[in-house]
Image (cartoon, rainbow, N blue to C red):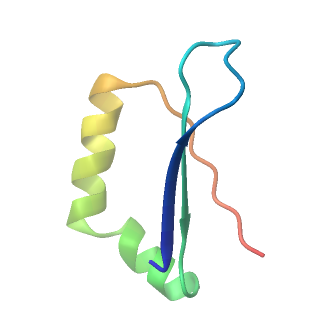
Amino acid sequence: MVEWTVALSTDTRKGRIIIEDGAFADAESFRDWRSSEHHRKVADRMAEIADWWVGDHHT
């Protein structure tokens, strides 16, 4: 991972929305992170305490 940003959305119509944006060096590093134990633990915890949407994109 080369960059990770966390911020509050400026759109407050649906309450508090947190935006997380991560940048990876390449597709392989992204796949490695997605399949890591750390990612699974965080995703499981977030699923317990929040409603969330995930979108992946590349340029």
Would you say 40 lies left or right of 1 here?
A: left
The image position of residue 1, as x and y in percent, is: 44, 77
The image position of residue 3, as x and y in percent, is: 50, 72
Q: Quadrant of residue 49?
A: top left
Instruction: Name, please, the residue furthest toward the right.
Output: 59
8 shown above or below 5: above
18 shown above or below 24: above
14 shown above or below 35: above
Query: Residue at 57% of width from left, 13% of height from top?
Result: 15
The image position of residue 48, as x and y in percent, is: 28, 27
Would you say 14 lies left or right of 46 here?
A: right
The image position of residue 37, as x and y in percent, is: 21, 64
Would you say 43 lies left or right of 12 here?
A: left
Query: Residue at 33% of width from left, 36% of height from top?
Result: 46
In the rendered view of the protein, which quadrant contains the C terminus?
A: bottom right
Query: Residue at 63% of width from left, 50% of height from top?
Result: 55
Front-most of residues 30 and 13: 13
Would you say 7 lies left or right of 41 here?
A: right
Front-most of residues 2 and 32: 2
